[in-house]
Amino acid sequence: MAHIDLGRVVRSVDSILRQRQGIHDFTDHEDCLFRISLTQSAAALHLSDGTSVAPGDPVIELHFWNEHLPIMPSAGPSTAWAVRLKRQMDRSLFLLDRYLDREPRFGDVAALTGAPPFASRIGEIQMERTGRRFGFEILAPQEAELGDRIHLVFDSMLLWGLGWTFNRPGLRSKTLLRRRYRLWISRATLHARYRDFEPPPCSRH
């Protein structure tokens, strides 16, 4: 049986999915944690700062840039790893705010969203606390339909493959099945938090 390069397969699938979903880089900075795509809101929502989004309104979707995520130590998360992740988050959101200010085609975008995976209930709570530090709000999903549950299985498999390819220590103590919860931040909140932000010094992995 021929040897299969799982890393190459995962990279190929990830690249194809990015192209199909219109996911693109908005900066070439090596510390940036996100790529973005332009999509439409599937439902009406109201954020805590008063921003309202109607079904069909344009929103920006955030996607983790897997190659730029800091490698988790083999022993698990450390203080240095957490500090590096926070610095990269701050710099990424600062760069994104500047990018949106320069791009008139995003003038109608009132909110940004992302759906990071959670491996456990504890992970969800931790991510909610972390999200709030950067201005994000979490909106929990409704009970999944059968089709959504099937999608969850394939999505979790891809996430495991990405973790195995780019950040194997991060797979430690994680279950295969993940669940995604929507995080939202308004364009106004992003700008208010990062328009006068002084980016921290670059830190290498």
Image (cartoon, rainbow, N blue to C red):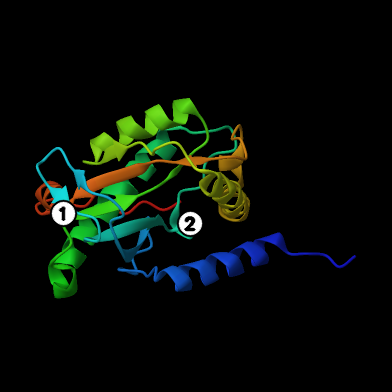
Q: Is 29 on the left or on the right of 45, as rendered? A: right
**Front-most of residues 184 and 52:** 52
Q: Is 64 on the left or on the right of 104, as rendered? A: right
Q: Is 67 on the left or on the right of 55, as rendered? A: right
Residue 4 lies, in percent from the top left, at: 78, 64
Tell me the residue that label 2 is attached to.
66
Q: Which numbered marker is on residue 73?
A: none
> Which amino acid type is shown beneath numbered disc 2?
Asn
Residue 93 lies, in percent from the top left, at: 25, 53
Q: Alpha-carbon neighbours of circle 2 within 10 Å: few (<14), some, or many (≥20)?
A: some
Q: Residue at x 34, y 56 (%)?
A: 62
Q: CA distance from mark 2 to mark 1?
A: 24 Å
Q: Residue at x 56, y 41 (%)?
A: 170
Residue 70 lies, in percent from the top left, at: 46, 48
**Front-most of residues 91 and 38:** 38
Q: Are marks 2 and 1 in contact (CB under 8 Å)?
A: no
Q: Circle 1 sits in a helix, a strand or a loop, which is it?
A: helix
> Which amino acid type is shown beneath numbered disc 1?
Arg
